[in-house]
Image (cartoon, rainbow, N blue to C red):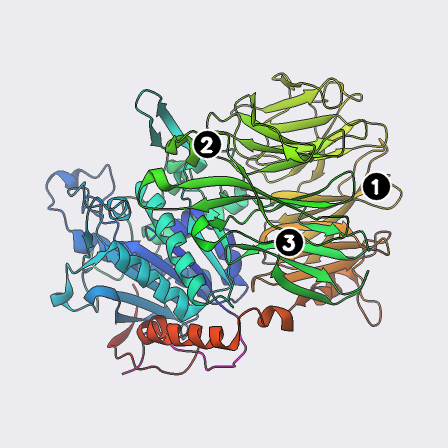
Amino acid sequence: MTSAFPSRPDGQDGPAPHLQICAHTDDDLYFMSPDLLHTVRAGLPVVSVYLTTGESDGYNLATDDAARKTTEPDYPGYTAARQHGIRAAYAAMHTGSRRAAWTRTRVCVREGVTAETATLDDGHITLIFLNLRTCVALPEQKILSLWSEKIAELATLRPAGSPIPASHDGRALSRAGLIATLTDILCAYRPAVVRVMNPDPDRTAYNAATGTAAYCDNSDHTATALFSLAALRAYEQLDAAHRPAVESYTGYCNKLQPDNLSAQAAAEKFGYLAVYGGEDGHQCLKGPGECGDRPLGNRAFNRYYGQSTTHRWRGTTNWLQRREDGRLTAFAVLGGRPHMWTQDTPGGETWSGPVPVGDWPADDQGRCLPRLETVRDGQGRLHLVAARALVAPDPEDHRREIMHLAQEVPDGEFGTWQYLGSPHDDGNAVRRRALGLPLAAVTASGGLQVIVRNSGTGLSARTAAGPGWGPWQDLFGGTLEGATAVTKRSGHTEIYATTRTGMLRWYQQEPGGTVLRDYATLLPRPAGPVTLLEETGGRLLMISRQPGTGWLLAHRQHEPDGPWNAQPHLLDTTPGYGPVAATALPGGTTVALVQRRDDGTLALSRQPLDASPLHQRWTPLGGGPYIHAPATALDSAGRLVIATIGPDARLQTLTVDAGTAEPVSPGPAKPVRASADAAWSTHRPTVEQAADASPQTAAAAADARRATGDQRFGRPFGGTSRLQRRGRTAADG
């Protein structure tokens, strides 16, 4: 009789897990891979939480199976088959075989409800099933109704063959009970990274007369994301010293996006979904309908939303900046608050941090979403622009707002975050919630302009005017999320964004002038946000990723301010994923590009900015997996520094000789590939950061964990706790 989860003894150092909070048993496979797959392959512990049973209509039969007409629905059986499928998929990811010995246990959570857990490899993989019902025959009994307080509680369903006692079938969780249960899980595992669903899906229709909207996502996904954010807020109040990195993933709205995975990456994702669906060619050793989710089967690609993996809060590549005194500073959002690391000396190897950056508003004013846009103005001051989100059961209380922070003087301190509001501060909750993520550009006068996708899918901008800010202006247009801006040496600002069919351009005929739109760029639709650079002759160079292949493409203007050459240059035919970081090297005639490839590692290329021919030569840098997107900058010695947020939510850096593209590493010279991984440096929290929480606060947090999460769940990786459970180990069929 031991705890449901093995606990890690106090003081023992080891990797903190990555925790996924999903609505259904296939959400992590569909929407959080390949990030999840890279985490498992890196040997990091993983915990996945599934809020609902996903029992749908109770028929575990293919949608075109004639037996549906004569078969009675079996909700517990279909739920059990889906949970069997996700165990098989994780076993295949972790061991290479779908058949593995899982330990299945029961665990008491809040309000007398009993959940089920399944652990593999001594708890290296942990799956937690809360089993809230989502039966189509009970349309009002939905998790979104629980979130919005339309219902007081939501019943659970005991899957067939579960270790949950039959007498506990149907016990219910309230809204507060579900938030507390998720908070308990966070307290028990203290994850380094938390992956959640999308709290703000795209609209497919909007009724201006009624102010209502239709959304492209499953409401279970949306509600799960909202519950996750509420639990994260409660957890961060309990344990202020622990700050996880958070990533959000788009659900069904992926089908509205260009396919941003290569054919190889998508096929790998669909392969594990076929294992989950029970139609991966294996011989099922269980009874009919028990080896997976048969309505999905091996047809995951037919849903059209698995061909992409889209981060709802898309990361930037400009979060590494050089200060006026030559030191580098890196910015990231940890625990819902902006933080920074800073080199101790210019060009040095040691960094201090993370420490909070600026005075963020009170906790009840909302959390900082994990995207920080960072630019330097004409005076040399650094500016940070972020989005703030507050979630609540009443849609009228949902807030999405833009925040701004600047150094008081070049190389000075950061003051208080300033509220810039939203283009939709008109009381319309639907429009306000559709706000996109901010983009920043320096104006011709050296000031700052903040640009954001608005509710109508066009762009809105607000510009600093003297000591204050001007009003929000509508730039019109219609785009997908993910615009990119560049301010040229002439002072002209240009903005490019992906549309349903191609690229839309905003431009100025004179610096600081009226912003015009160009719908006829002839540029193909990229897989995501592009990278824009100005060449030495004044032409723009655009780096993009091709949908469906993951290849890197480059387009050049025929002449400065002229039309684009629609014929791309191939920069890399090795598939990759995500945005490309770029930094001009000393002399200004060469740019360093850093990208993530399909295996989760980074690669570096030096490309010309003087109109010379582009090429496909890349240097592998190792690294990975990491969170969000990489960033690059030059240090005080003119060397290229590449930064990532590692899987432990700590800053990682790699210093590269800009002339040879070789990592700078102490000791004898080694081949690039052999030394790349060893040359990456992880910067552990400093004493100052650990002291953010007083001894009294730390003790209170420990007591809170023991009183909530630890008492119910234990802590991962070794040891025992007071929780009594009954478990069994069996090889899945």
What x and y, as percent, mark residue 86?
34, 57
Specify whether 236 is left or right of 669: left
Crowd band around label 1 with a 10 angstrom C-alpha radius: few (<14), some (14–19), many (20+): many
Reading the chain from its start, which is encountered first: label 2 or label 1? 2
Q: Mark 3 or mark 1, which is nearer to you?
A: 3
- Which residues are the magenta region? 1-15
- Residue position for label 3: 331
- List the residue tagged with mark 1: 590
Q: Disc 3, disc 2: CB below 8 Å? A: no
Depth-wise, is mark 3 or mark 2 nearer the camera?
2
Residue placed furthest toward the right? 587
Element at badge 2?
A: loop
Tell me the residue that label 2 is attached to. 425
Residue 6 belongs to magenta span? yes
What's the residue type where badge 3 is placed? Phe
Q: Is residue 685 above or below residue 315?
A: below
